[in-house]
Image (spheres, grey):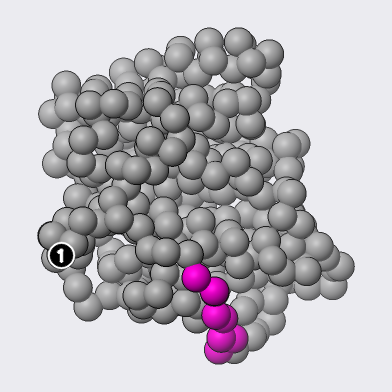
Amino acid sequence: MSRDSLITLLGDLPEDGPISVELLWCEEFDGFRLETLLLDLNGIERVPAYVATPLGKQGPFPLALFNHSHGGNYTHGRNEFIRGSSYLQQPSFAKTLTDMGYAACCIDMWGFNERGGKTESELVKEMLWQGQVMWGMMLYDNRRMLDYLCSREDIDGSRVATLGMSMGGLMAWWLAALDQRIKVTIDICGQVDAHTLIGKRGLDHHGFYSYVPGLLKTFTTLDIQKMIVPRPRMSLTGQNDRMCPIEGVRLLDQGLIEAYNEAESPAHWRSVIASGGHMETMEMRATWQTFLAQYL
């Protein structure tokens, strides 16, 4: 159950090519500089992205790769990074992360915001016919975005974290499992054990985007998450979040406690069950900021 065999399940991925970048504009906000970029990451369609860096500070900066949520809002996408969402705390992740001294970024994922026009179900069907997996294509774009960012002189590629909420949290732990350049992982309301979700008949609480054909023939959710060990990771879940069944959260917690203990890094794993449902609470915000500052 290697990392390479997991990548193989993600369908026919694009060949890595040169990454071209166009700077569309640059603005100054309260405490950070925001670049709006258009990148060729996959050779199929250009990817809009935001990159935020702290004002008045010198790089190279540690990097926080932010993954936007789904929320059924296909027009939002990377705007969540600078504007937030109804289920996220304020200030925005762009403001919060740059205030902490990090560079931060977010892309529009397939089907969202400026990459819209085709529905999620349409994209899934089209990609399956072509031997592709939508989740694999989404992961690919984020890994290529990381390639670009690590090539920049103002980014410290040895200090990289990833974080996000819901779909963005799921993306965070998958990215960390696949890419060892990621040193710290924080997932908010994205801790979903596949077998528990099936047992609780919760599949229809989630979109089609993340389903990987044949995955459970070879891997459990815990198998994938163990690939992050011993790197620091925090997982935050609301106790009333029906999209992340608590039975599965506790099952994964027990397995990861054992794995991190075996790796002699027990402090590097922390599972937090907070109040509320599918949302980032103020407790979560304060807790993940402390964890990120400690390890990045």
Find residue 288 and report its horizontal and vertical position in percent: 61, 39
How many C-alpha atoms fall within 10 Å of the one at disc 1: few (<14), some, or many (≥20)?
some
Which is the main secondary structure of the residues drawn in magenta? strand
Q: Is residue 111 magenta?
A: no
Q: Does the magenta stretch include residue 21?
A: yes
* Identity of the residue furthest to the bottom in this view: 24
Quadrant placement of the N terminus: top left
Q: Which amino acid does label 1 sit on?
A: Glu
Rendered image quadrant of residue 182: top right
Q: Which residue is drawn at 51% across and 62% down?
A: 144
Rendered image quadrant of residue 52: bottom right
Find residue 277 and report its horizontal and vertical position in percent: 35, 37
Q: With 63 as the anchor, is 205 left or right in this view?
A: left
Q: With 274 as the anchor, is 121 left or right in this view?
A: left
Q: Residue at x 22, y 26 (%)?
A: 217
Q: With 217 as the anchor, is 148 left or right in this view?
A: right
Label tally: 1
Q: Which residue is drawn at 31% across and 18% down?
A: 247
* Image: 53 above or below 266: below
* Image: 278 above or below 117: above
Residue range highlighted in magenta? 17-24
Identify the residue under disc 1: 126
Front residue of 207/9: it is 9
**Residue 165 visible somewhere in the drawing:** no
Label 1 sits on a secondary structure element that is: helix
Quadrant placement of the C terminus: top right
**Residue 269 visible somewhere in the drawing:** yes
Front residue of 287/291: it is 291
Find residue 80 and report its horizontal and vertical position in percent: 45, 64
